[in-house]
């Protein structure tokens, strides 16, 4: 199975390397968006292998006891409203999400986690709570615990079930890549 590899350059710049494909120049470049969409498609296949033919309802997640080896990475499938956590090449967890509603779309591409705060309040949206916030861009888009109605409903963030968000927060670190695919 084709796997994506992530390389963090010494300069701190993020570059995607997909076998036989050019290196992405920026987080939201066409290549980064394609790589993120490919990662989301592969994650759906990996979910079948790891968890079988299970379907999740809004607010549910699955987390394997096997920890996996290697660095963590998060893959988001906007079309499936799912988040996947990998450790190395092992799919460790999958969760339902709620991404940005129409007009407040969640950006696609590959983003490093830039900042983490256990208890954060939105500066844009009337101090709305954002527990286990992991910011991925300079405009305030983040992964965080929040309401999951089963459809895209956020202002662009990726909302996660509270317990899943807490576990994910403990596994990731600043610099962990987040692939957000259509």
Image (spheres, grey):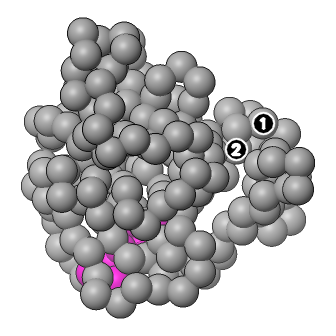
Q: Residue at x 68, y 33 (%)?
A: 28
Report if residue 59 is visible in the image: yes
Residue 159 shows in this picture: no
Residue shown at 35% from the left, 90% from the top = 66
Q: Is residue 8 above or below residue 34?
A: below
Q: Which residue is mark 2?
A: 32
Q: Mark 2 and 1 residues: CB-CB less than 8 Å, in contact? A: yes
Quadrant in the picture for residue 25: top right
Q: Name which residue lies at 41% across and 49% down.
A: 77
Magenta span contains residue 25: no
> For mark 2, does the 10 Å Cα neighbourhood hold few (<14), some (14 to 19), or many (20 or more) residues?
many
**Residues in magenta?**
42-51
Name the side, left or right, on which 139 lies relative to 80. right
Residue shown at the point (29%, 38%) measured from the top left? 119
Residue 45 magenta-highlighted:
yes
Q: Earlier in the sequence, mark 2 or mark 1?
A: 1
**Is most of the magenta stretch helix, strand or loop?**
helix
SS assignment at label 1: loop
Mark 2 lies on a secondary structure that is helix
Q: Which mark is residue 26?
A: 1
Q: Residues within 10 Å of mark 1 (few under 14, many from 20)?
A: some
């Amino acid at each position: 199975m084709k796997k994506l590899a992530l390389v963090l350059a010494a300069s701190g710049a993020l570059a995607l390397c997909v076998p036989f494909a050019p290196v992405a120049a920026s987080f939201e470049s066409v290549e980064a968006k394609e790589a993120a969409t490919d990662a989301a498609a592969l994650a759906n296949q990996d979910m079948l292998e790891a968890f079988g033919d299970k379907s999740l309802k809004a607010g549910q997640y699955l987390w394997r006891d096997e920890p996996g080896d290697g660095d963590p990475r998060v893959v988001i499938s906007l079309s499936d409203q799912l988040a996947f956590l990998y450790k190395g090449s092992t799919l460790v967890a999958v969760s339902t999400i709620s991404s940005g509603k129409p007009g407040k779309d969640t950006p696609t591409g590959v983003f490093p986690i830039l900042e983490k705060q256990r208890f954060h309040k939105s500066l844009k949206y009337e101090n709305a709570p954002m527990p286990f916030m992991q910011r991925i861009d300079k405009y305030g888009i983040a992964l965080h615990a929040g309401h999951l109605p089963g459809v895209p409903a956020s202002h662009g963030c990726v909302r996660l079930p509270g317990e899943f968000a807490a576990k994910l927060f403990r596994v990731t670190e600043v610099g962990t890549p987040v692939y957000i695919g259509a």
